[in-house]
Amino acid sequence: MALVATILNIGGGIYNNGILTITNSTLSGNSASIGGGISNDLALATITNSTLSGNSATTRGGGIDNTGTLTITNSTLSGNSTPLSGGGIYNNNTLTLTNSTLSGNSAINGGGIYNIGTLNYYNTIIANPTSGGDCVNGGAGSILSGFNLVEDGSCLASLSGDPNLGPLQDNGGPTFTHALLSGSIAIDAGNAGVCPSTDQRGVTRPIDGDAVVGAVCDIGAYEYSPDSTFPTVVFDSLVASYASGAGPSNFTVTFSENVHDPTGNTNADDVTNPDNYLVVEDGANGTFNTVSCAGGVAGDDVQATITSVTYNAGLFTATVNLSGALPNGSYRLFVCGTTSIADTVLNTLNNGLSDYTFDFVVGAVTTTPPTTSSVSASALPNTGFAPHKVTFLPAQPAELAYSALGDIWLEIPSQNIKSNIVGIPQSEDKTWNVSWLGNETGWLNGTAFPTWNGNSVLTAHVTDANGLPGPFADLKGLNHGDQIIVHLFDQQYIFEIQNSRMVRPYTTNFAFQSMSRPFLPYTHHLSGIHSIF
């Protein structure tokens, strides 16, 4: 039979004359005389959570030609075509469609579906044909319809009109989908009795999308959510420095909200997928060449092995297990936002603009700190970029390079802040350029070294170059008695907030006043953009 199919050019992507099951798959760009994507020839086929797009046939069934029993659930047929009948599907036996979306398909007869068999369809969208109408019932075809949205009202549809769909694109999950846009009449318009528990992407159904009568299943393969808040990492259990031979073998990562945790651990958006975390050790060049999860491990960086990840949805916390305790070295953790982790409605971590990173050292080398304790300054450093906007930074000039200070890092428990401290050189114009700080804290060279007698000035970003909140985003929220801890060479130096003042950017006297004891001034500019200790 397969030879006959080849000779007759049937089933461009798949020819089935037995039992076929397709799940979480994409069939695209195939062509044939009959059944450009699939020919289900007097056979049994089940398609779930899959997309057929851009397939074509010269006679019938641009996407699928069915002469058997075909069941399609939570799937998308988009941009399939034929010059004759059934741009999306040509049905000449039994077709059952549930919570699926057919959009942008074309034919002379039945751009979406041409039916001369039995069509049972529920909670399904058929719309936007470029020709041939949405659904044509020809010959002796029969139809059982419930809670469907067909744009031109054909095939006994419950609703008609524009479903207001987004383009076929990556909306999260393993396959491309057409999103329901805000205000779509398909939102909360389905029948819960036949609605699957998740949509095509794996998002849990139902979600209250119109805030009218509670959560009701949407029509189509995509479940709409009004939630557009992207998750962030609010805490990880790593510390900036570990004693020699005492590296971590696991750590936790806590998110700002519940994140996506489908069954298994291989889904690209899954918080328990080990590929969504990256721990690298700098190589012989002593520099981290890896810059993002999207870019992958680069240069001579060495990737540590992550064996498994577990997730506690109640605490929004993932536990990441390594293959063993990390040996001495300098490491960087990436929690992947540029490629993967998303919340339960698949808003991506950090809006997909950046990864969460944290640098730490096992077996840190002790260095001798500088001893300068007085400074002249023309202005406080500018520590903020524009919120929600990516600012592209030039390469950091050698004369502005930050200096490693050894085993020293900052902790503010009330705000879950943990950050390495690096040295910021003072320029000839008596200013400091902190543009390249990232998630680190800068010590302004020329002020007293942290914990030494005198006035120590530390700074960090309020908004980072990716437009996301930096370490000091909520510094103004510190209250009297809140602790600021400087960890230095296995010692803790604990400071407490005693008072706060508002100063202008060029009012430097308070921040840089001479002190005879260890002192961390806390100032917040009137502009609300700059914040320093």
Image (tube, rainbow, N blue to C red):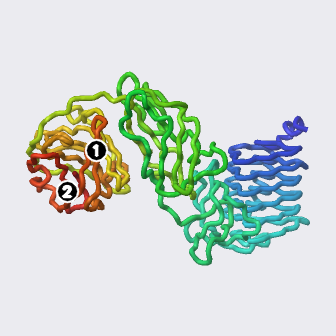
Q: Quadrant of residue 11?
A: top right
Badge 1 element: strand
Q: Is residue 182 left or right of residue 364?
A: right
Badge 2 element: strand
Depth check: give the residue in front, 239 or 119: 239
Q: Is residue 241 left or right of residue 167?
A: left
C-alpha gap between disc 1 and disc 2: 15 Å
The numbered dot on residue 523 is: 2
The numbered dot on residue 340 is: none
Residue at the image position 28 percent from the left and 39 percent from the top: 491
Q: Is residue 375 left or right of residue 107?
A: left
In x, y percent, where is residue 108?
Answer: 76, 59
Query: Can you see residue 72?
Result: yes
Three-letter amino acid code at the position of disc 1: Thr
Residue at the image position 42 percent from the left and 27 percent from the top: 245
Three-letter amino acid code at the position of disc 2: Thr
In x, y percent, where is residue 299?
Answer: 43, 27
Report the residue that reaches farthest toward the top: 284
| Pointer 1 local density, CA inside 10 Å: few below 14, some 14–19, many at least 20 | many
Report the residue that reaches farthest toward the bottom: 212
Residue 307 to residue 482: above or below: above
Which residue, given by chain and number where applicable, does mark 1 sit on?
441
Q: Is residue 15 left or right of residue 225?
A: right
In x, y percent, where is residue 232?
Answer: 45, 53
Depth check: give the residue in front, 418 or 378: 418
Residue 367 to residue 37: above or below: above
Quadrant of the frame with the N terminus: top right
Residue at the image position 38 percent from the left and 34 percent from the top: 242
| Pointer 2 local density, CA inside 10 Å: few below 14, some 14–19, many at least 20 | many
- N-term mark: 1 or 2: 1
In x, y percent, where is residue 255?
Answer: 48, 53
Residue 261 to residue 219: above or below: above
